[in-house]
Image (tube, rainbow, N blue to C red):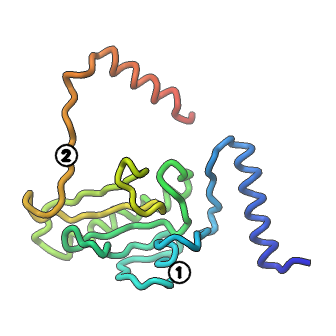
Amino acid sequence: MISQAEAVKLFGLLQNIVIMRLTNKKEVMNMTNQRDASCIFCKIIDGEVPSHTIYEDENIKAFLDTSQTTPGHTLVVPKTHVKDIFAYDPELASKTFAKIPMIAQAIKAMDPKIIGMNIVNNNGTVASQSVFHSHFHLIPRYSEQDDFKIIFGDNTEKYSEDQLNQIQDKIKSKLEK
């Protein structure tokens, strides 16, 4: 006989299998704040690793990034262990994204020297994701000489109107209706 806790966990796994079969998705999240025991962010969420938490509710935790690229550099992390943006469902996205403006406004209000903010979400190794638990960096900007840069290449001349239309059509065809 299994315990009630084991039954609940098994039920959650069965739900995920059914949802995966119904939706044909490779990754589906259990919206009950599922954790990965080997994940540093899950350990922070569970209080096993200390953090400088600035905001927390039942869905997210926001804490200072130890690197402090600039003073106030904060991570916003969903409490559900999800690898990257590609594994979000609309409910998790809504619960996570809804709090980002509030947290960004609080960071900006803490120092009148903050004149801007980068909000960054890296997905995959090639995009510099180093912790594979989705998270958003809120990086206050104090000047153009602070210790953070993003460089966007300008490839305007490499794409014709026809090529842009083809890219547009490919993306639009993949959007869920």
Where's residue 175, x and y in %? 52, 34
Q: How many marks?
A: 2
Depicted 22 relative to depicted 117: above or below: above
Dividing the picture into quadrants, the one containing residue 142 is bottom left
- Image position, residue 42 (x, y; %): 52, 73
Residue corresponding to mark 2: 151
Where does the N terminus fall, quadrant-wise? Answer: bottom right
Task: Looking at this view, name the residue that lies furthest to the top.
Answer: 162
> Horizontal and vertical percent for residue 69?
22, 68
Task: Compute the Cα span from label 1 to label 2.
Answer: 36 Å
At label 1, the amino acid type is: Asp
Give the amino acid type for the residue marked by disc 2 in the picture: Ile
Q: Nearer the viewer, residue 83 or 107?
A: 83
Q: Nearer the viewer, residue 137 or 151?
A: 151
- Seen in the picture, residue 26 relative to 42 is either above or below; the reply is above
Q: Is residue 141 above or below residue 28?
A: below
Q: Is residue 82 left or right of residue 75?
A: right
Residue 57 circle label: none
Within 10 angstroms of label 2, few (less than 14), some, or many (20 or more) residues?
few
Residue, disc 1: 46
At 24% from the left and 57% from the top, the residue drawn is 118
Residue name at image x 30 percent, y 76 percent: 66
Of the numbered discs 1 and 2, the one sitting upstream in the chain is: 1
Residue occupying image coordinates x 40% and y 25%: 168
Is disc 2 placed on a helix, strand or loop? Answer: loop
Image quadrant in which you'd find residue 36: bottom right
